[in-house]
Image (tube, rainbow, N blue to C red):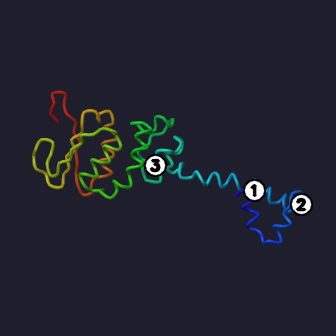
Amino acid sequence: MKRPDLDRLLPEVMQRAAQPGQPLAAVLDVMEALVTPVEDALAGVDAVLSPYRAPDAFLPWLAGWLDLDGLLRPGPLETRYAPGLSQLRLLIARTMPLNFMRGTARGLIGVLEAATGVSGFHVQENVTAGGEPLAFHLLVRAPPDSARYAELVRHLVELEKPVALTHEVVWPTPGGTS
């Protein structure tokens, strides 16, 4: 808060007493110096809470707010999330909208694509990889490019699928079938 704004908050009699060189003026100058850095920090708080604008070091904290910290590995910040920090930013930004679709094939595919940066996941219900019918079972067909994130994909399927369902995740074999 700038000095003129502080002056306007005072009763009129005190405003007249807050002249340069007077004790009240000195107190108001100190008050301005103390309050201004706090106001400046609060004015930029939205940048810290936005996944696209937050400093890299703040991303694990934001991920923790959304219960995504279980996807992070120990170690240096740059390697804590296998697909990279830019993909972590995208996952953090998309988590809340995707939560409305949680437990659905569309929601599972959305999470997998946001988390890995790879598109082309397919979910089939009540069938195994061999094509046999199996009730309460999910088959997740993952695109070949996601194989490098196999551990992350399996972990996310386990977290995001309905708890009563069994599941399997398959990638295409070198011959072209999965």
Q: Quadrant of residue 57?
A: top right
The residue drawn where x is 10% and y is 50% is 133
Give SS at disc 3.
helix
Cβ atoms under marks 1 and 2 closer than 8 Å:
no
The residue drawn where x is 27% and y is 40% is 119
Mark 2 surroundings within 10 Å by alpha-carbon count, few (fewer than 14), some (14 through 19), many (20 or more): few
Using the image, tell me which numbered label, if any, was put on residue 63: 3
Give SS at disc 1.
helix
Q: Quadrant of residue 83?
A: top left
> Relative to 168, is 27 on the left or the right?
right
Using the image, tell me which numbered label, if any, was put on residue 109: none
Using the image, tell me which numbered label, if any, was put on residue 32: 1
Asked if 168 appears above or below 28 in the picture, the reply is above
Mark 1 surroundings within 10 Å by alpha-carbon count, few (fewer than 14), some (14 through 19), many (20 or more): some
Q: Earlier in the sequence, mark 2 or mark 3?
A: 2
Residue identifier under label 2: 22
Q: Nearer the viewer, mark 3 or mark 1?
A: 1
